[in-house]
Image (cartoon, rainbow, N blue to C red):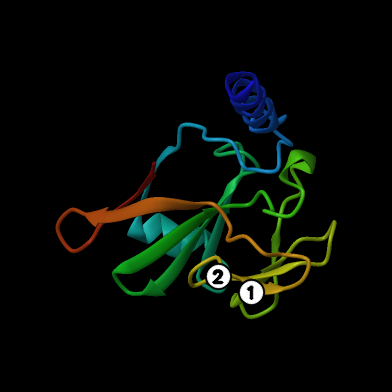
């Protein structure tokens, strides 16, 4: 009798742990983007470069200091299955999800206003070359 009860509990726990994925994550896609520092300066607005057709919903490359950059996917972490693209607010310090009203800090991608609770998806940025000429965004 105890073996049957134990077996039933084990089966119950196994089935309880097999939930459906709700899709509330930003998928991993290959990102490998290169730009020179001069081209970045020409194209960026307020230190933020928006690049379409890379990542899930495009990427943002943000210049923090002369040799320090961060990059995030534009896909909002709020309901990412909608692929809603965050837009940079005036001043280039924050970005807003126009679908939900969520706000994110562009220095680290952290959520700043509800309903956001997850960070923006970040990508690795390296600066290489003589005089920090090449900016490479990858994952």
Q: Say which quarter of the image contains residue 92.
A: bottom right
User: Residue 120, image x and y in percent?
Assistant: 58, 57
Number of labelled discs?
2
Who's the residue at 58% across and 61% down the image?
119
Who's the residue at 65% across and 29% down the image?
9
The quarter of the image holding the N terminus is top right
Q: Decide: few, some or many residues near mark 1? Use Cα within 10 Å; few <14, some 14-19, many ≥20.
A: many
Q: Say which quarter of the image contains residue 116.
A: bottom right
Q: In this view of the protein, which residue sits in the foreground, 55 or 100?
A: 100
The residue furthest front is 1
The quarter of the image holding the C terminus is top left
Q: Is residue 36 left or right of residue 61?
A: left
Q: Earlier in the sequence, mark 2 or mark 1?
A: 1
**In the figure, 128 relative to 6: above or below?**
below
Q: Say which quarter of the image contains residue 102.
A: bottom right
Residue at mark 1: 94
Residue at mark 2: 106
User: Residue 10, image x and y in percent?
Assistant: 60, 26
Q: Decide: few, some or many residues near mark 2? Use Cα within 10 Å; few <14, some 14-19, many ≥20.
A: many
Please tell me whether mark 2 sits on a helix, a strand or a loop. loop
User: Residue 54, image x and y in percent?
Assistant: 55, 38
Who's the residue at 74% across and 36% down the image?
22
């Amino acid at each position: 009798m105890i073996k049957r009860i134990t077996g039933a509990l084990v089966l119950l726990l196994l089935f309880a742990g097999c939930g459906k994925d709700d899709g509330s994550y930003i998928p991993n896609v290959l990102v490998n983007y290169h730009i020179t520092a001069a081209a970045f300066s020409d194209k960026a607005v307020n230190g933020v470069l928006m690049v379409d057709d890379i990542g899930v919903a495009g990427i943002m490359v943000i210049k923090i200091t002369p040799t320090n950059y961060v990059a995030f996917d534009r896909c909002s972490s709020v309901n990412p299955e909608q692929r809603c693209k965050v837009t940079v607010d005036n001043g280039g310090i924050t970005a807003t999800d126009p679908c939900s009203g969520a706000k994110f800090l562009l220095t680290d991608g952290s959520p700043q206003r509800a309903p956001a609770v997850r960070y923006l998806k970040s990508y690795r940025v390296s600066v290489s070359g003589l005089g920090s000429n090449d900016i490479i965004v990858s994952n």
